Amino acid sequence: MKTEERPTGPPPTRRRRHWTKRANPVAGLGSVLWLAVVIVPIYAMLSASLTSQDKALTGNPLTPPTSPTLDNYNTVLNSGFGHLLSNTAIVAVAVVAIVLTLSVPLAYVAVRTRNRWSGMAFRLFLLGVAIPAQAVVVPLYLLIAKLDLYDSLLAVILPTAAFAMPVSVLVLVGTLRDVSEELYEAMALDGASPQRMLFQLAIPMAKGGISTVVIYSALQAWNGFLFPLIFTQSDGPRVLTLGLFNYVSQFGVNIPALLASVVLSGIPIFAVYLVARRALVGGLMGVGGK
């Protein structure tokens, strides 16, 4: 029998395709325009916050201040800004804790329970995405008054967490659907209970979605305005969004101090976004699941 002779030389190298990057002037122009739309208002806000009140309404808002001053920031810091910041932080942390405690098990049950009733319950739960807060603010007001929670931080925390739940469950369901079924089956063969699979498999594999839920619910609590306005009255439970009214009076508006307060209140949430922006984008990309 004849044996086939194998080549003894080095294996032939595969030719790699070199992809050439083509210029896209339309996309570049759109990026520049979008950057201008974002940067110009921020620059105008920072510039006005460094201007004295008598010069706030005169001149071009895009012109740098001739004599910048930090008096507006001192005014804000000496007007109870620390109290407003602590209340807002308490609301944000409480909302995130409630949303995570409830939405993670709900999403896990929606993914792992394969029957008609769980699917119907999940679709019914997602109807909350289509219900605006303005449509139910009067029933919520009556409910909070009956529970004797009016003019307290709980009156802000509970509705905010409730309206953040549907989107949070949707994000987590999309993330948990990407977990391989073989991993669940392997843990089931080892005798793992559903609770153990939740804490040792589902939650570690859903870190991206959980990070997205944390940022989303924290933003909802930090920027919330309607619920603090309707459900609080005194200065005790006042948050940052309501603190902006401190610079509005019947005689006028202290525009530089108002903008300085906006700048200071936006720094913490902007820092959180810079730290967790990759997790936020990654979690939102997994909403659709498999």
Image (cartoon, rainbow, N blue to C red):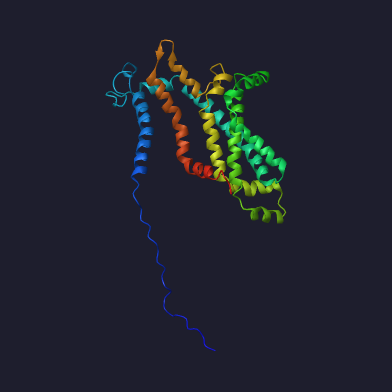
Is residue 188 visible to the viewer in this orientation of the structure?
Answer: yes
Image position, residue 114 (x, y; %):
70, 46
Tell me the quarter of the picture where residue 63 sits. top left
Q: Looking at the picture, tell me which residue is in the foreground, 87 or 215.
A: 215
Image position, residue 168 (x, y; %):
59, 37
Looking at the rendered structure, the number of numbered marks drawn on it comes to 0
Residue farthest along the top direction in this orientation: 251
User: Measured along the vertical axis of the image, is residue 90 above or below residue 178?
Assistant: above
Image position, residue 76 (x, y; %):
42, 21
User: Measured along the vertical axis of the image, is residue 179 above or below residue 145?
Assistant: below
* Residue at the image point whose x is 64% and y is 21% from the top: 139
The N terminus: image quadrant? bottom right
Image position, residue 207 (x, y; %):
56, 45
Is residue 149 visible to the viewer in this orientation of the structure?
Answer: no
Tell me the quarter of the picture where residue 209 sits. top right
Residue farthest along the front direction in this orientation: 26
Relative side of 101 to 32, left or right: right
* Residue at the image point whose x is 54% and y is 23% from the top: 226
* Residue at the image point whose x is 54% and y is 29% from the top: 221
Residue farthest along the left direction in this orientation: 66
Relative side of 216 to 267, left or right: right
Relative side of 90 to 181, left or right: left
* Residue at the image point whose x is 63% and y is 38% from the top: 103
